[in-house]
Image (spheres, rainbow, N blue to C red):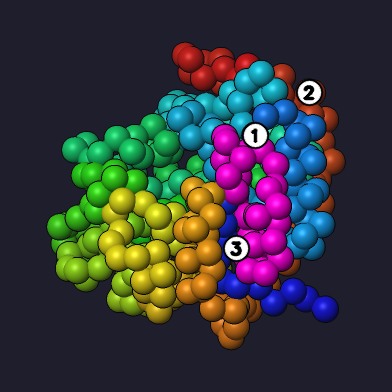
Amino acid sequence: MRRVSRAFITGLAGPSITAEERDFLRDAEPWGLILFKRNVETPEQVRRLTSDLREILAEVPILIDQEGGRVQRLGPPHWPVYPPGAAYGDIHDRDPARGIAAARLGARLIAADLHRLGIDVDCLPVADVPVADADRIIGDRAYGDTPAKVAALAGAAAEGLLEGGVLPVLKHIPGHGRATADSHERLPVVDAPRNVLDSSDFAAFRSLAHLPLGMTAHVVFTALDPAAPATTSPTMIGEVIRQAIGFTGALMSDDISMGALTGTLAERTRAAVAAGCDLVLHCNGQIDEMRAVAAAAPRLDGAAAQRAVAALACRRPPAAFDEAAERARFAEMMAASAGTVVS
């Protein structure tokens, strides 16, 4: 019988599960779990952790942020360093086909790292389209500064993850590239008119709207909703993410504990779900906060449950490939971009 989980994803405090966390996970039954650097020591330890988690919650999806560049939870000495999205954009500028091939292969290699650890969801690709005066929180994480280029490279990365048995998470819908603040710290407000947003910020996501999972942006778009960020705005989720962009996958919030949001964690959780988020993401591993989110998160039901089930149904075994040869090929492809060679 399929587990009926609550509509939230939670973190953990450290590299192993505490007795308190074990009891919490059994009682709260989150839909998914997310790992950060604090949860990672060695490959053997991570494999043991993911195995222990699935003894508590069978078949639970386990997520991580492994983009490359500044956002990489797995790194030396046990895992390679991967380039940021902009490196693929640089190659694309010289040779579009080669740039797309590099983005796809880079993601395929990341998926190989993750799959052998028992991690089956990666919060990648980033489809944000940055502008010149935006906060650097996106910066070189972006594949480029035009919607078409970003969509092409993000789509290639998503395909690479799927080929490697890992689900992609499209972020940050409907766009964080124009934000002039870091939503980890405070609420970004974007005043661009609707026609500009449609043709730029939102456009990159449209051709990626079929992906199984997506993550919202904690960003206010005053042309559509002058008060609430996309995560807690029924207008932004209903009219923009679901209708104008056409996103059909399961939609999770960005981290509900970030500084951009106000109110208690219970209030934030209820607001995100009421606005149309299927899943609420809470990352910091603080058990009291985890309990507050769990208490406010409903059981997955209706269309949200259907989308969550459909997302997990997209998981498939990795396609066979010669990993050593492909890593050598990837290093050669990246050699033309200074400072981006995988090590």
Crowdedness of circle 1 by 10 Å Cα count: few (<14), some, many (20+)? Answer: some
Q: Quadrant of residue 210?
A: bottom right
Name the residue that disc number 1 marks. Answer: 40
Residue 321 as seen in the image, left or right of residue 248: right
Q: Is residue 90 visible in the rendered structure shown here?
A: yes
Question: What distance separates the C-alpha of mark 3 from that of mark 2?
Answer: 30 Å
Q: First in sequence, mark 1 or 3: give its number.
A: 1
Question: What distance separates the C-alpha of mark 1 from that of mark 2?
Answer: 27 Å
The mark closer to the camera, 1 or 2, is 1
Residue 229 as seen in the image, left or right of residue 28: left
Horizontal and vertical percent position of residue 215: 47, 58
Magenta stretch encompasses residue 17: yes
Crowdedness of circle 3 by 10 Å Cα count: few (<14), some, many (20+)? Answer: many
Q: Which residues are magenta?
A: 12-39
Which image quarter holds the C terminus? top right
Secondary element at tag 1 = loop
Q: First in sequence, mark 3 or 2: give its number.
A: 3
Horizontal and vertical percent position of residue 145: 33, 40
Horizontal and vertical percent position of residue 7: 56, 71
The mark closer to the camera, 1 or 3, is 1
Name the residue that disc number 2 marks. Answer: 325
Q: Which residue is at 70% across, 47% downward?
A: 17
Crowdedness of circle 2 by 10 Å Cα count: few (<14), some, many (20+)? Answer: few
Residue 186 as seen in the image, left or right of residue 313: left
Name the residue that disc number 3 marks. Answer: 212
